[in-house]
Image (cartoon, rainbow, N blue to C red):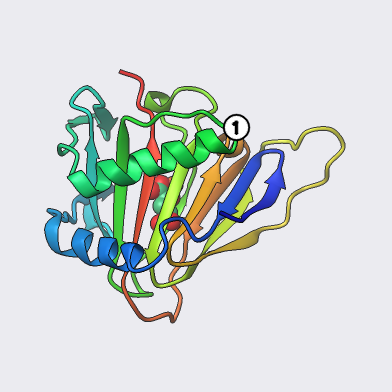
Amino acid sequence: MPTDILLSDPPLWLTTPLLGEPQASELLARLDAELAWQRPTLRLYGREHPIPRRQVWMGDPEARYRYSARDFHPDPWHPAVAALRDRVTDALAASGTPARFNSVLLNRYADGEERMGWHSDDEPELGCDPLIAAVSLGAERPLRFRGKPGVARPGDAGPLSPFNVWLPHDSLLVMGPGAQGALQHALLPRKIPGLRISLTFRWVVG
Ligand SMILES: O=C(O)CCC(=O)C(=O)O
Ligand SMILES: [Fe+2]
């Protein structure tokens, strides 16, 4: 599997293809059809807003997640998602990066209008310097990165200019240790038609 090193410090790598066809397209159709996609609301400045995408939180029972002072329990592993988790774990081990995952956030973007705002995946449950593995299926869209406001870069490196990482169908983006401390990322709205599903595998510290 060809891997592009997009950034070395913090590590950001893109591998494509991950599964090959027809497996990748079959997985996209199966996840779309078989998962209990939710559109929870988020409270912002005292008002409830439905999130601009759908999602499912899945994982081991002890991989609980606290968010907005609420405990979220993961859905049990769907067999196709568990198989993908093992595939990603094997691919990482083969490239000399042993990692394990007890949970995954699945995001479903119906079209280019649906999106995710600027954030880092730096919740305390994820421990310090997590490795997050993100699989993309469906419409190719750019994940935009920028330096985290107020965080200096290592050495004399100047400020990092924002950049796009285009995520093709059937690709794996690895955000390695340090990426969440140094960078933010967002899936901004774009006039790109078509369904996209991403799966961001994580380890949640119990
Ligand atoms: O959909 C994507 O590629 C980004 C998802 C993401 O940032 C997340 O799940 O934390
Ligand atoms: Fe994220």
- Taking the view exactly as shown, the residue that stands out farthest to the right is 156
Q: Is residue 149 among the parts visible in the rendering?
A: no
Name the residue rendered at 15%, 54% in the picture.
35
- Taking the view exactly as shown, the residue that stands out farthest to the top is 206
In the image, 42 versus 74, the foreground residue is 74
Name the residue rendered at 84%, 33% in the picture.
155
Residue 135 location (% of width, % of height): 42, 53
Residue 179 location (% of width, % of height): 59, 39
Q: Where is 154 relative to 42, above or below?
A: above
Residue 9 figure quarter:
top right
The answer to whether 130 appears left or right of 109 in the picture is right
The answer to whether 97 appears left or right of 11 in the picture is left
Q: Quadrant of the N terminus?
A: bottom right
Callout 1: 10 Å neighbours few (<14), some, many (20+)? few
Q: Is residue 110 among the parts visible in the rendering?
A: yes
Tell me which amino acid carries mark 1.
Gly
Badge count? 1
Q: Where is 86 relative to 191, above or below?
A: above
Q: Where is 120 relative to 70, above or below?
A: below
Residue 19 location (% of width, % of height): 41, 57
**Residue linked to disc 1:** 96
Q: Where is 158 relative to 25, above or below?
A: above
In the image, 60 versus 90, the foreground residue is 90
- Secondary structure under badge 1? loop
Q: Quadrant of the C terminus?
A: top left
